[in-house]
């Protein structure tokens, strides 16, 4: 009886450990699968958006940037797939260990059950049971012996049922193991295809970089010029924000040198709502991929040149409409000579900025609602690309849009 209780304890413990481990691994596997699908969708969008510009003459700089970006995304996909395969390998190993343990425990259980059956058979006759009862000293002992006979029979029945249950568990584990092995092989095949595509893209990238190195000074000069233009617009934007903060403080009777907005009760509610939607704001375009991320990065052409980005640059479709990411008021509209039209929308003490517009549908002072179209993205004639620059400020400091926009990884 004691050995059966021990077996029961170990089966129960094994079941809990296996169940908890499988749940954790299954959750992680699902997270990886979701991320993989997002990356695959991003690659499809990249192919679609880049394909649109193939009919037009693209600059070598844009082609290298596009390939560099696509290679990075492809490498991310391979990394995710590798993680999935490694996780499946651990699951397969755990399953194999659990199967071995379960087989061993089942063997012991069957041996114990067989011994019980033999013992029961030897004392099976009704005469033996009657003699066992009649040999009792008193009625109370006879009653207890009768209960023991019943309990022993019930215990024997339970052991038989337990063997059936454990046998079924073993069969299910074997089925899971076969499925896991098929899934792993599928991931291996997917990774092989992804690596083949990656090698093709790297080869194209190598050819383009070789042509650039022949006249590197020319291309680095173009990069520096583009960065200077972007810096100039950023400084104008910062000036507009400082003036807006000074104006709000002047109206509130506060110091105009303050580096924060003087908020009205309505502004405070709007800012609080904007903050509460962090990570859930809609994209400023319906379809697009982030080509340049927030922060300072090295140029793919010349690693010695830093590329500063106050926001993100989103590659999108031609004639794509730009939409506000939250309720607010048009604070300012910039129309510089280079045609890089810009709209600034204020949301309490937050400002969202939409740069590189060909058309503007709003005016300064307009009240805007979430997802309302405010303009159209400009398509660059030289590169054939349609890119929106999107920036978020809190007071006078930039924010990483990836932390605010839904699934902008």
Image (tube, rainbow, N blue to C red):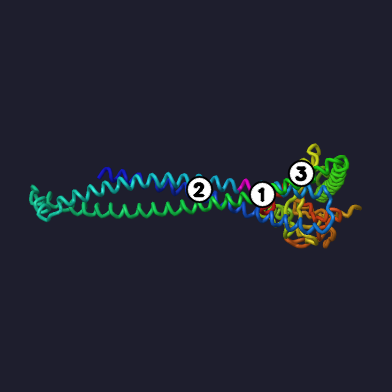
Frontmost residue, 93 versus 28: 93
Labels 3 and 1 touching (C-beta < 8 A): no
* Residue 206's disc number: 3
Give the distance between the C-alpha atoms of the residues marked 3 and 1, in whole angstroms: 15 Å
On screen, residue 372 above or below 22 = below
Quick one: label 1, few (<14), some, or many (20+) residues within 10 Å?
Answer: few
On the question of residue 276 being in view, the answer is no
Frontmost residue, 77 versus 242: 77
Number of marks in picture: 3
Instruction: Give the mark nearer the N terminus: 1 vs 2.
Output: 2
Residue at label 1? 196
Instruction: Give the mark nearer the N terminus: 2 vs 3.
Output: 2
Q: Is 89 colored magenta in this rendering?
A: no
At x 12%, y 49%, the residue is 141
Which range of residues does the magenta coloring cover?
76-80
Residue at label 2? 24
Q: Quadrant of the N terminus?
A: top left
Q: Is 78 colored magenta in this rendering?
A: yes
- The picture places residue 93, in percent across and down from the top left corner, at 47, 44
Where disc 1 sits, the SS reads helix
Relative to 26, 332 lies left or right: right
At x 85%, y 59%, the residue is 358
- The picture places residue 50, in percent across and down from the top left corner, at 76, 55
User: In front: mark 2 or mark 3?
Assistant: 3
């Amino acid at each position: 009886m004691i050995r059966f209780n021990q077996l029961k304890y170990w089966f129960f413990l094994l079941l809990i450990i296996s169940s908890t481990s499988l749940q954790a691994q299954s959750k992680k596997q699902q997270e990886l699968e979701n991320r993989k699908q997002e990356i695959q969708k991003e690659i499809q969008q990249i192919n679609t958006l880049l394909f649109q510009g193939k009919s037009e003459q693209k600059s070598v700089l844009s082609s290298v940037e596009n390939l560099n970006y696509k290679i990075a995304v492809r490498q991310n996909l391979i990394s995710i797939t590798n993680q999935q395969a490694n996780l499946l390998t651990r699951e397969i190993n755990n399953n194999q260990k659990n199967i071995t343990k379960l087989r061993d425990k089942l063997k012991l259980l069957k041996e114990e059950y067989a011994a019980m059956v033999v013992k029961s058979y030897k004392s099976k006759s009704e005469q033996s049971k009657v003699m066992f009862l009649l040999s009792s000293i008193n009625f109370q002992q006879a009653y207890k012996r009768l209960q023991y006979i019943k309990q022993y029979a019930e215990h024997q029945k339970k052991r038989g049922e337990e063997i059936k249950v454990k046998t079924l568990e073993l069969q299910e584990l074997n089925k899971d193991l076969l499925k896991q092995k098929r899934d792993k092989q599928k991931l291996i095949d997917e990774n092989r295809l992804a690596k083949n595509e990656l090698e093709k893209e790297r080869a194209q990238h190598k050819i383009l970089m070789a042509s650039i190195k022949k006249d590197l000074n020319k291309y680095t000069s173009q990069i520096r010029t583009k960065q200077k233009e972007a810096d100039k617009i950023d400084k104008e934007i910062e000036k507009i924000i400082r003036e807006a903060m000074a104006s709000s403080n002047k109206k509130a009777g506060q110091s105009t040198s303050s580096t924060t907005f003087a908020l009205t009760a309505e502004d405070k509610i709007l800012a609080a709502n904007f903050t509460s939607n962090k990570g859930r704001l809609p994209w400023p375009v319906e379809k697009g991929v982030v080509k340049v991320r927030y922060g300072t990065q090295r140029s793919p052409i010349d690693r010695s040149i830093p590329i500063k980005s106050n926001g993100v640059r989103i590659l999108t479709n031609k004639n794509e409409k730009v939409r506000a990411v939250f309720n607010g008021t048009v604070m300012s509209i910039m129309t510089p000579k280079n045609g890089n039209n810009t709209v600034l929308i204020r949301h309490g003490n937050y400002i969202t900025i939409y740069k590189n517009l060909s058309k503007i549908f709003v005016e300064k002072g307009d009240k805007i609602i979430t997802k309302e179209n405010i303009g159209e993205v400009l398509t660059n004639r030289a590169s054939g690309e349609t890119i929106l620059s999107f920036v978020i400020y809190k007071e006078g400091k930039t924010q990483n849009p990836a932390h605010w926009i839904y699934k902008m990884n």
